[in-house]
Image (spheres, rainbow, N blue to C red):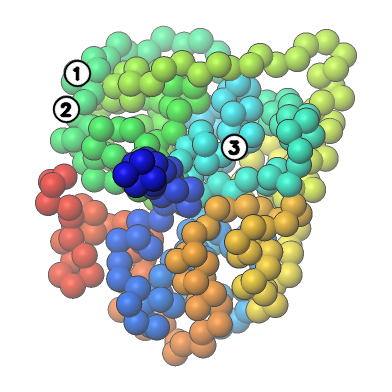
Amino acid sequence: MRLAAIIALCLPLLAMAQPVVPGFERFPRDTPAQQVTAGEVLITELNCVACHAAGEDQGRRFQRRPAPVLFTHHNPANGGWIRHWLLDPQKLKPGTLMPDLLHGMDAEKKSESVEALRHYLMTLSPGTAREAAMIGSSVEGKKLYHSLGCAQCHAPDARDNGRDIPLGELRAKYTHANLIKFLRDPLHSRPAGRMPRTPMSEEEAAHLSVYLRHRLKPLDLHGLSRGPAVLKLQQEGAKLYQTLRCANCHQSPKLDVQPAFSKPLTEVNPQHGCLAPKPVASVPHFHLNAAQRAAITAALQAKPAAPTLLSKTHRQLRLLNCTTCHDRKALGQPDAQRD
């Protein structure tokens, strides 16, 4: 009985280890063809082609998915939040698509690298100057969270659970004013379009911001260094930004860095690199589960017929998670409990 209880307690934690991709989780993978399609969705959502060039055939099946911009006035950098984020992306935001790039380092080396990176990243930010913003109501924000459809993609209680698209530590990442801007125009800083621009007034965005930020406890945010040490940290961080190939996924208004590619997708060994159960220190760790690795492997090894207009349309509907709000016959429909 005690063992069963321990297993029951651990299961949610295990479920929170992998990236959350609705276009993978919400669709069947029972047949070889379905498995290949699911893998194609994952390869796109994890932005594999940002580091691994796709072959001519693969280029018609795998898309590029831009990561968030570093940084804009809608999502300026917060040094304390960045520290938590880089130390363990999955811990801070269970289900995130962001890989752990520093997983192969010991605790001391990882902490030093994070310090250097965050001091450099702060130089790319427009800053977080205090600005006036409309006051909101958490009570009204909770109502809007459901009436505007936020709960269709994110957990109904707005708490990350490893199954729905995670929200993350919004209170630590955004000021109230910045979150209002983001909610009204998420495409400004997240060009992939997975979060659509939902028409809302500034007042409605203010209500939502208060609800989303105040549901969280404040994080322990470590301040930035001052004095002569800062320049050295920034220089070390700039080198790490290059060697870790951050620019392959993230664009920045202040940078023009060309991507540094790894081996092409046609040469990827599904048993090694990012797809290994325990990736080596030199490659990103996405925390993929066995089902995700199997689907990606199937997609890489497949040689399907050229995609049709219908199949491309269906794949795009999956990538954008359209059926979480819209009924598309056999392709999918909204969760009745969230409607």
The numbered disc on residue 139 is 1
* Callouts 1 and 2 close, C-beta under 8 Å: yes
Earlier along the polypeptide chain: callout 3 or callout 2?
3
* Side of 143 relative to 248 (left or right): left
- Please count the marks in the image: 3
- Of residues 186 and 164, the one nearer the viewer is 164
* Side of 15 relative to 280 (left or right): left
Give the spatial CA distance, label 1 vs label 3.
32 Å
Earlier along the polypeptide chain: callout 1 or callout 3?
3
**Residue 182 place in picture, x, y as percent:** 41, 31
**Residue 252 place in picture, x, y as percent:** 64, 40
- Of residues 278 and 43, the one nearer the viewer is 278
Asked if residue 125 is positioned above or below residue 31 in the image, the reply reads: above
- Identified at 33% across, 21% down, the residue is 215
Residue, disc 2: 143
- Of residues 71 and 277, the one nearer the viewer is 277
Asked if residue 283 is positioned above or below residue 197 in the image, the reply reads: below
Judged by depth in the image, the label closer to the viewer, 1 or 3, is 3
Name which residue type carries label 1.
Val
- Identified at 73% across, 47% down, the residue is 104
